[in-house]
Image (cartoon, grey):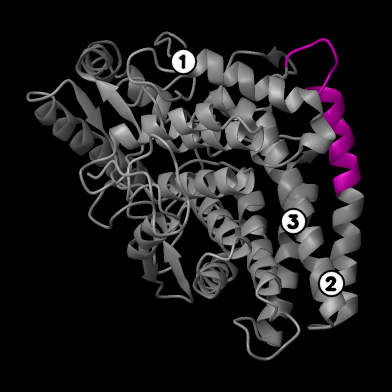
Amino acid sequence: MSTDPATDDGIVADHVAAPMAAPSFHLDVLDELTFDAETDGAVPLASLPDNRYPYVYPRDVASITRAWLAATDAGVRPAACRDHIVAAARFFTAVQADGWWYQRYALDGTDTSIYQQEDNVAHGIRILAHAIQAEAACGDLAGSGGALDGAFLETLVARIGDAVAVLREECYDANAHLLESTTSIHEGRIESGYTLWVNCAALAALGQAADALERVAAADAVAIDAAAAVRDRIDAFRTLLEGGVERSFAVDGMPVPRRYTPDGERDERPDITLFAPSYFGLEELFGDHAARAATRAAHSLEDPRLGGLQRFRGFYRDFDVHQHGGNGPWMQYTAWHAQFRFDRGEHERGDEVLATITQHADADGSIPEHLSTRERFEQFLEREWDTGLDYEKEFDDEALRDVPQDRIVEELGHMQQAYDEMAAALEEREVISFAEPLAWCHAEFLVALLRREQSG
């Protein structure tokens, strides 16, 4: 791989190898991972179809459409990125069920979810809002030459309204003033209760939806009354939720907790979700708490051997923690760290973080999901996999949806295959990577590059 930092996009990233320093490279990877759906539209899979994750995840796609939107705003392939976002929105309008989006889908629209992860409702709203925002950024929202026709705009408004109703009526605890749910960041009870991630994701979704609907109303592209009515419901709910989040997670003199447990106990253990306020652009609400929380996560979770950020501190007797083949850094979250540094104008530190990701990419520049070492993997097998403890954690009733047992057996088979492949690979090397390339990782790396350029 070349180490010349100059790129064809005019962006120079010191210490970041070309072609990975070029936004076009990551857009190409996302193109390769995007497939026509059998329902409607086209949508990115998490990774290649023959990999462990041949599914469409709302969480991943919301991050990818966020990256495409950032590229659109930056003038990097704007029309192509806009078309990708709209195609993804078409898929998500087609698979929404009674206002809900779930953990994952097949390309034919089949719900293949295992875990509850109610934050996917917020991610679905974000995807639809991104479509409207991208169309507006390309200047086509009020015209006839864009990717959104009037009928589909009406559908987007309706689906956003249905999803907002689910968050308000099904997930919001009016007594706690917060959303209660599990999340898509972790699989188990570590992320159940009133979590920072879910509440921030919802606030971001409500804010983006409000902005999108305002653009729709201003463009007179659909019936203004429909967009205005949904916007009014969003504004009322957003005010309630902002108050609860501020009073629960941004308390002076106290660290930002990653969650409150279902019975209200503060959980202040460091966790990657402490980046949520900055990741979702909620600094106005959180103030200095956003930067303090992200900094605490960055310092606490950096892998001492491999670099990059772990999801959490891995203590195997903690029933909430899943080691997944051995604890180690996750590249998409490490890219969050780079984004945070660039947003603060810390270019040298941001470049160092991107260089950490680059050194773990393969010879083609494909970025893996996460990494582990031989020692960690062997400890995981001995302590958790062979004892059945990992099975108990992974398929805990507290986090599972009501799904058929054969779906759990299928997932268990995927896990066994991945660990067998990992064991074989570790016969020849000390470090192993999972799921390569991962679309989400390339999307977050792309956003980091664009943030670097924007921050000067």
Q: Secondary structure at mark 2?
A: helix
Name the residue carrying label 2: 227
Of 143 and 376, nearer the camera is 143
Of 279 and 318, nearer the camera is 279
The image quadrant of residue 79 is bottom right
User: Residue 297: x percent and y percent?
Assistant: 58, 20
Q: Secondary structure at mark 1?
A: loop
Q: Which amino acid, mark 1? A: Phe
Question: Does residue 401 appear left or right of residue 290 in this picture?
Answer: left
| Residue count near mark 1 (Cα–Cα under 10 Å), binned few <14, some 14–19, many ≥20 | some
Segment colored magenta: 238-255
Question: Does residue 447 appear left or right of residue 264 in this picture?
Answer: left
- Residue 208, which numbered label? 3
Q: Which amino acid, mark 2? A: Ala
Q: Is residue 55 magenta?
A: no
Contact check, label 3 and label 2, Cβ < 8 Å: no
